[in-house]
Amino acid sequence: MTETSKPLQAVLPSVDKVLRHDDGRALAEAYGRAAATDAVRAVIEELRQRVLGPGGEGADTAEEAVLASAADLLAAKSAPSLKKVFNLTGTVLHTNLGRAPLPPEAIEAMTLVAGGASNLEYDLESGRRGDRDVHVDGLLAELTGAEAATVVNNNAAAVLLVLNTLAKGKEVPVSRGQLVEIGGSFRMPDIIRRAGCKMHEVGTTNRTHLKDFEEAISAKTALLLKVHTSNYAVQGFTKEVSDAELAQLARKHGIPCVDDLGSGTLVDLAQFGLPHEPTAAEALAQGMSVVTFSGDKLLGGPQAGMIVGEKDLIGKIKKNPMKRALRIDKVTMAALSAVLRLYLDPDRLVERMPALRLLARRADEIAATGRRIVDPVSRALDGIAAVELAGCQSQIGSGSLPVERLDSAALRITPSTGKRGGGAALNRIAKAFRSLPIPVIGRVHEGAFLLDLRCLEDVEAFVGQLDRLTPGGASR
Ligand SMILES: *Cc1c(COP(=O)(O)O)cnc(C)c1O
């Protein structure tokens, strides 16, 4: 301590004194006495370190300053970490950004069951315990033409459960061209092993023939597996066994044929101007015994894994004790059931399903949104970056139609640093957009920060927060 400094206790206010201040009382009222006390104590402790450190004489030790810091601390702590963002990445079904936006019908259904009791697993007719699958299995069967259906937590769980039920301790032949990895943690070989099965790789990366499967089948073979190569394409000199051939071979040997469709959709997307993706109904019609697919990819619903197929196989799958560990909760069930009911009216799907609406949005419509916001964004970035409306390409995402691109429009934001390699400036701009009250997530592409406007619908909310943009640093 230097000679001029007063004893610390004389400089720093006491926790009690701060809490007796009017603003201190207000904090305790808002956040609870214990939390407010902890926050004030933490701020005073930090201040103590600062005062003791170099240049500490300048630290503001007034009660008001302590209270302001404590209020910031409490606000940050009590703010939810999971929040709404603007997905302007150009990837519509972005796994890291929560995939499909849900339709209002699903949100309403979720709200209805979330806050109270429901007949989730209760048969209102008999007054006895029921089966939660009844809320979706009939709909799924109707929409896919399957004999039976069940549902679990996601498609990864669906694949795990199907393999564990039908092939535990036995061999599963699968093409080397289909050993998919989805986003790091889901790798087909690992899932097959974790399901208790032995993977039998057949064919090569680019070419797999029917005879490769034929030669692999033995008394140890439990089923034949097809995996949709959902996030990549094998192009060039290639050969794949068709669904019909594979299913027929399985039938000849009296074993099931299982198809992990990945995204899977219930309708032909070509009718909305999108590329065709195999539907669950098509896979079943080709003779697949069991088909699995995601709820929150092209289907546009909540995270869930659909399992549809032959009645006896679905029956076995439902009896597997792992089903209990992988089941979906009431809120998801409510959303899924509502989404599936919308599919009963395919003509109105694009207006009612947000995921399909965004995917089907035409480039000229998206550009019209761009014309509404290019000036406000330019003004917000005045002197920092140039903003122009440009054509771009969106992608569907979540391992759906990996090579297809959708024409779209974007704001192209180029830092006016002039220099090539203005990477730091770009990162600052990207960060400023991420720091908005509703964070805006874009992508860096060819020396510019791109905001793909395909998924921007709430223009007012987007423009309304631009005055909070601080791309030059917090000082602005
Ligand atoms: C996406 C995908 C999965 C995993 O589905 P989730 O619903 O994300 O668990 C499995 N297989 C394929 C082929 C996929 O595309």
Image: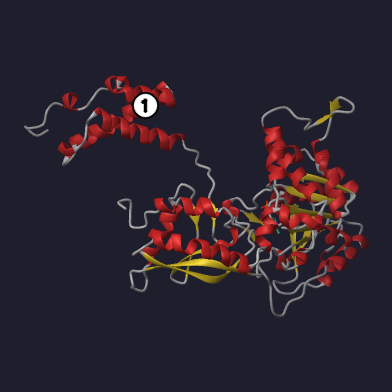
Q: How many numbered badges does the structure rendering display?
A: 1
Q: Position of residue 383 (x, y in %)?
A: 33, 64
342 or 307, nearer to the observer: 342
Up-down relation of residue 413 to residue 56 (above or below):
below
- Decide if residue 65 is on the left or right side of residue 154: left
Colour pattern of the rendering: secondary structure
Using the image as rendered, state which of residue 302 and residue 49 is in the foreground: 302
Pinpoint residue 192: horizontal percent, then vertical percent. 72, 54
- Up the image or down, 419 lies above or below 66; here it is below
Q: Is residue 203 left or right of residue 47?
A: right
Residue 240 point in image, percent of width and height: 78, 72
Q: Is residue 24 above or below residue 167?
A: above
Q: Circle 1 — which element? A: helix
Rendered-image quarter of ligand 1: bottom right
Task: Say if residue 327 shows up in the picture.
Answer: no
Looking at the image, is 33 positioned above or below residue 57? above
- Pointer 1: residues within 10 angstroms few (<14), some, or many (20+)? some
Q: Is the shortest distance between ligand 1 and the CB of mark 1 under 8 Å?
A: no
Would you say 266 lies left or right of 311 here? left
The amino acid beneath tag 1 is Asp
At 37% from the left and 54% from the top, the residue drawn is 470
The quadrant of the rendering that contains the N terminus is top left
Q: Which residue is mark 1?
A: 38
Camera sees residue 294: yes
In front of the other: 316 or 140: 140
Location of residue 8 (image quadrant): top left
